[in-house]
Amino acid sequence: NFINIWTKACALFSFKDLTLENGIPDDLIAHLFNPIDLLRQTSAFIIYNENKDKYLNIKSRIKEKLRDDLDQTIEKSELTANSLIIEKTLMLRKIDIFKNVSYKYLYHLARYMDDIFPSSGNIVTLSLHEIKDKTLLIFGNQVTFTVDQDLPVILQPGEIYFMNNYISKKGKAFVIEKNEESFVFYIEKNVLIYNMFDYHEIEMSFLSWLNKEIETEVKKDDIENIPDHK
């Protein structure tokens, strides 16, 4: 039952703001061995930041496959903010088209969502191969996207951007610039398509968003085509 899993994950995540004066609870440790990544990652993050030595001692008892996943989780959490699945799931609700989608379905998208910035820098330059077929999700403050030093395009927070609409095969350098309050994540196009087919709520959200985009474009065309009677 996802509601129970999500409730438990949120309860675990709340430990990040607490000082565990009586030590790390056994229940929290037990989730390091949980096959559900949402619970396993969240508990690993809390335990590691509370007591690194204890985490490393326990980690040796975890199955290798799960241990490798936790190593990646900890490594990412030290490089970038909002790298946990629970954090990314919560962030997706801030995207306008997902505001009415349940966490149950956003969780599946969040699992395939990555930060476009590999470290703490505010400028990243990408090749055509690296930007093609990606959907960007903007959080916090607006960011700029520039192709080969042309005029930048402003990408607004709370929106998604299909980057194939903004790139040219002739482009050589694609630059994204943000500030400290901005976060830029991406999801591969194929992942979005698969999730739309698998989950009706996500499909309907995209269809609703697409209809609004079409209406906006039609209105722009109508304004531009108003005859000049001067």
Image (tube, rainbow, N blue to C red):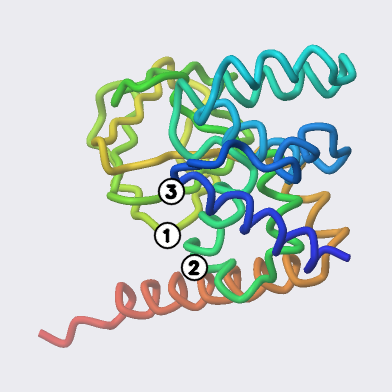
Given this view, does label 2 or label 3 mark the residue nearer the observer?
3
Amino acid type of the residue tagged 2 in the rendering? Asp
**Pointer 1: residues within 10 angstroms few (<14), some, or many (20+)?**
many
Residue nearest the viewer, comparing 79 with 101: 79
- Residue at 55%, 41% (x, y): give it: 22
Q: Say which residue appears at 57% left-offset and 47% top-offset.
A: 88
Contact flag, marks 1 and 2 (Cβ < 8 Å): yes
First in sequence: mark 2 or mark 3?
3
Note whether 72 is above or below 151 in the view shown: above
**Disc 3 target residue:** 17
Give me the residue at 49% from left, 68% from top: 96
Task: Report the Cα–Cα distance between label 2 and label 3.
Answer: 28 Å
Check disc 1 and report the residue beneath it. Answer: 158
Q: CA distance from mark 3 to mark 1?
A: 26 Å
Report whether 184 appears left or right of 196.
left
Q: Position of residue 102 (x, y in %)?
A: 69, 70
Residue 5 in picture, x, y percent from top left: 79, 59
Q: Which numbered disc covers residue 96?
A: 2
Quarter in which the N terminus is drawn: bottom right
Of 103 and 63, nearer the camera is 63
The alpha-carbon separation of the residues under discs 1 and 2 comes to 6 Å
User: Which corner quadrant of the image does residue 52 belong to?
Assistant: top right
